[in-house]
Image (cartoon, rainbow, N blue to C red):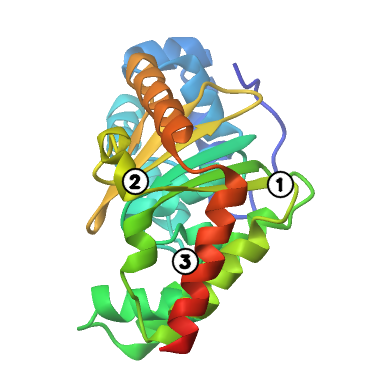
């Protein structure tokens, strides 16, 4: 369980939330485990909020405010701490990516966000948010590009991407955008900590998921799964469901083309787009 640690509460909103949660808990004379029992979660979970390792949750903040009789204090801090440069439904998963030891993703429709070029990301965002202002679109594109900084960090995770062949055959933006995007995937896959495989149409029975799935493992916490659909995302932490997703991912990995054959297919498809 994360132990209480000294944080600079003024370093950022999340640290301030954690410091205030710890203050209220200690004022009530409760340990992390005791508080967790009262709000139906683990003491470890409480510790992650206090140490600013997890973004606070609005529903839990409301329960805590009721327990501590603190008005809407933690709820207001939660709204401030949850401010993010990425879509709100993805913000928790983006935060966890920075702590992950391994990230194993399955992408059935789009190139995974960690491997997207700016042009590809902009084309997607313009399509999915066609009624949003150009400024909002550019904010989200910048957020996605900044998110990719996790691949440059000294603690960078091992990233394994399985991309369905349908992603290669479904143009996003114009042909030049697609050619650059697929070449970028090939380039990224030459890094020692990134593996890319393509799941071909001929292996459809192994395409076990109909939405994007990311299995993340950590050195100091249990693995979890993030799934994403159109405009929504969900974190799954139930051990049995996480294990089931991990096993299904292993089956898809076994059915996919080898890394070398996958890069050949990506490169040849890129050239096809470039010639159109």
Which x, y percent locates residue 82?
A: 43, 53
Q: Which residue is mark 3?
A: 85
SS at badge 2: helix
Q: Depth check: 272 or 189 in front?
A: 272
Question: How far apart are the two marked residues, 2 and 1, measured between alpha carbons?
Answer: 33 Å
Q: Which residue is mark 1?
A: 156
Residue placed furthest toward the right:
154
What number is the disc on residue 178?
none
- Badge 1 crowding class, 10 Å Cα cut-off, few under 14, some 14 to 19, many 20 or more, is some
Please state the total of marks drawn on the protein image. Answer: 3
Which x, y percent locates residue 106?
A: 41, 44
Q: Compared to 177, does 262 lie above or below?
A: above
Which x, y percent locates residue 235?
A: 35, 36
Q: Are marks 3 and 1 in contact (CB under 8 Å)?
A: no
- Badge 2 crowding class, 10 Å Cα cut-off, few under 14, some 14 to 19, many 20 or more, is many
**Mark 3 vs 2, N-terminal side:** 2
Q: Report the residue at 40% width, 33% height from top.
A: 252
Q: Are marks 2 and 1 in contact (CB under 8 Å)?
A: no
Q: Report the residue at 25% width, 73% height from top.
A: 128
Which x, y percent locates residue 25?
A: 49, 23
Question: How far apart are the two marked residues, 3 and 2, measured between alpha carbons?
Answer: 20 Å
Residue 15 seen in this snapshot: no
Image quadrant for the N terminus?
top right
Residue 42 seen in this snapshot: yes
Q: Depth check: 126 or 160 in front?
A: 160
Q: Report the residue at 27% width, 41% height from top.
A: 204
Q: Are marks 3 and 2 in contact (CB under 8 Å)?
A: no
What number is the disc on residue 75?
2
- Left or right of 157 on screen, residue 46: left
SS at badge 3: loop
Q: Compared to 128, does 134 lie above or below?
A: below
């Amino acid at each position: 369980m994360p132990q209480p640690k000294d944080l600079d509460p003024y370093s950022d909103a999340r640290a301030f939330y954690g410091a205030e949660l710890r203050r209220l808990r200690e004022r009530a004379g409760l340990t992390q485990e005791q508080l967790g029992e009262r709000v139906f979660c683990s003491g470890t979970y409480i510790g992650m909020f206090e140490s600013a390792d997890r973004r606070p949750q609005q529903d839990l903040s409301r329960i805590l405010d009721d327990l501590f009789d603190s008005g809407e204090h933690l709820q207001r801090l939660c709204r401030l701490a949850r401010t993010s440069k990425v879509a709100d439904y993805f913000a928790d998963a983006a935060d966890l990516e920075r702590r992950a030891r391994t990230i194993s993703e399955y992408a059935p429709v789009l190139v995974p966000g960690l491997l997207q070029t700016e042009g590809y990301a902009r084309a997607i965002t313009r399509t999915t948010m066609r009624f949003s202002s150009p400024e909002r679109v550019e904010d989200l594109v910048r957020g996605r590009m900044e998110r990719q900084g996790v691949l440059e960090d000294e603690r960078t995770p091992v990233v394994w991407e399985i991309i369905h062949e349908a992603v290669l055959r479904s143009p996003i933006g114009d042909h030049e955008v697609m050619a650059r995007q697929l070449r970028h995937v090939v380039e990224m896959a030459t890094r020692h900590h990134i593996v890319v495989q393509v799941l071909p149409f001929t292996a459809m029975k192994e395409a076990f998921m109909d939405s994007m799935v990311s299995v993340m493992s950590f050195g100091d916490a249990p693995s979890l799964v993030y799934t994403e659909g159109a405009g929504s995302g969900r974190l799954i932490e139930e051990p049995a469901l996480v294990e089931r997703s991990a096993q299904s991912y292993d089956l898809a990995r076994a059915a996919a083309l080898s890394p070398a054959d996958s890069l050949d297919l990506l490169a040849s498809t890129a050239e096809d787009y470039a010639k159109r």
